[in-house]
Image (cartoon, helix red, strand yellow):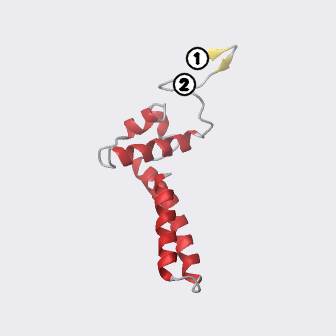
């Protein structure tokens, strides 16, 4: 039983990794983003996401309900800023449409590559 000086210690991570400074949820999102883009959504398992984040699969469910929630949050984080920019660019009717479209495309690419 894990105790340390009479104090109960949580379960160890599946793999010891350097502290990223991210919350466990953010680590799961980063891991899911990487795996979804390299393996594809269908081929990525929750076990793979948890392992990439350095935790056990059972622990992952403390932070997210599953793969669907991870995908939804990742999509929202990329779509919401693009929609806000598109609305601002639509309002800038003094700038040529081609320039505004180019700016939107460039910003989208930078966001998705990040």
- Figure check: 79 above or below 68: below
Give SS at disc 2: loop
Q: Position of residue 16 (x, y in %)?
A: 52, 23
Residue 8 at what x, y percent from top left? 64, 21
Secondary structure under tag 1 reads: loop
Residue 24 visible? yes
Residue assigned mark 1: 2
Query: Residue 86 in the image: x percent, y percent?
Result: 52, 74
Q: Are marks 2 and 1 in contact (CB under 8 Å)?
A: yes
Disc assigned to residue 54: none
Residue at the spot of label 2:
11
- Answer left or right for 103 relative to 66: right
Residue 51, image quadrant:
top left
* Residue occupying the point 57% across, 86% down: 93
Q: Quadrant of residue 89?
A: bottom right
Residue at x 54%, y 25% (from the top left corner):
11
Residue drawn 49% across the image and 44% down it: 30
Q: Earlier in the sequence, mark 2 or mark 1?
A: 1
């Amino acid at each position: 039983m894990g105790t340390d000086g009479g104090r109960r210690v949580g379960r160890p991570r599946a793999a010891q990794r350097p502290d990223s400074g991210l919350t466990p949820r953010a680590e799961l999102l980063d891991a899911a983003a990487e795996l979804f883009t390299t393996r594809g959504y269908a081929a990525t398992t929750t076990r793979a996401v948890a392992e990439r984040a350095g935790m056990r699969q059972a622990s992952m469910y403390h932070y997210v309900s599953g793969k669907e929630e991870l995908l939804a949050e990742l999509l929202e984080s990329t779509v919401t800023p693009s929609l806000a920019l598109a609305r601002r660019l639509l309002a800038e009717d003094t700038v040529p449409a081609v320039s505004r479209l180019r700016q939107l495309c460039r910003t989208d690419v930078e966001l998705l590559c990040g």
